[in-house]
Image (cartoon, rainbow, N blue to C red):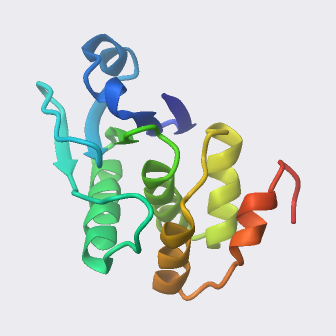
């Protein structure tokens, strides 16, 4: 589990099942994509999103709205998918874009700096670009190595 912001974490499925880890980070909201996991005193949303396919707009909106609403309630949020690489990172990127009002690629670089495993799948990246009307080439995501592009 990596902390992207004081209130935002990205993790793997197995971390959603680790009560002591969740307690240590004061997680009180989880957005999940691998499998539904319910924990006491943690608000959860599970969305059946597969990696490697275009993201359905209603799922993107529902997931980002969950993060925004949880953030507005001062919750610490864990966004988790199977490996913590693509789906969870994509939603964290979208959330930062909306909450901090920054361009999509800047949100990607912020997430990547704090969670080096970040690598949205091509179709998820294209879905984000299409939804937000920003056309940053996927090559920029693939070739980013911690420097400004």
Identified at 22% across, 56% down, the residue is: 47
Judge from the rendering whether residue 85 lies leftward or rightward of residue 139; answer left or right: left
In this view, the residue in front, 56 or 21, is: 56
Relative placement, left or right, of 26 versus 87 is: left
Give me the residue at 27% from left, 69% from top: 59
From this view, report whether residue 96 is shown above or below residue 37: below
Identify the image quadrant of the C terminus: bottom right
Question: What residue is rendered at 50% in x and 72% in y?
Answer: 123
Where does the image place residue 133, in percent across and percent down from the top left?
55, 88
Location of residue 126 by image quarter = bottom right
* Residue 97, percent from left and from top: 54, 67
Residue at 32% in and 21% down: 22
Q: Quadrant of residue 135?
A: bottom right
| Residue 123 against residue 48 in the figure, above or below | below
Give the vertical position of 54 relative to 67 (above or below).
below
Position of 39 compared to 123: left or right?
left
**Of residues 15 and 65, the one drawn nearer to the viewer in this rendering:** 15
Q: In the orientation shown, which residue stands out farthest toward the top? A: 20
**Viewer-proximal residue among 41 and 121:** 121
How many marks can you see?
Answer: 0
56, 132: nearer the viewer = 56
Counting from the top left corner in percent of width and height, residue 112 is at 67, 47
Residue reaching furthest bottom? 133
Q: Position of residue 37 (x, y in %)?
A: 17, 34
């Amino acid at each position: 589990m990596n902390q992207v912001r004081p209130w935002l974490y990205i993790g793997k499925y197995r971390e959603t099942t680790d009560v002591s880890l969740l307690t240590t980070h004061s997680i009180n909201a989880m957005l999940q994509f691998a499998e539904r996991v319910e924990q006491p005193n943690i608000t959860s949303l599970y969305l059946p999103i597969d990696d490697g396919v275009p993201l359905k707009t209603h799922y993107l909106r529902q997931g980002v709205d969950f993060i925004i609403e949880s953030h507005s309630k001062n919750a610490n949020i864990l966004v988790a998918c199977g490996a913590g690489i693509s789906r969870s990172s994509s939603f964290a990127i979208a959330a930062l874009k909306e909450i901090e009002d920054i361009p999509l690629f800047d949100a990607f670089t912020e997430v990547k700096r704090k969670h080096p495993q970040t690598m949205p799948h091509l179709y998820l990246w294209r879905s984000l670009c299409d939804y937000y009307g920003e056309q940053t080439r996927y090559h920029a995501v693939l070739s980013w190595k911690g420097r400004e592009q």
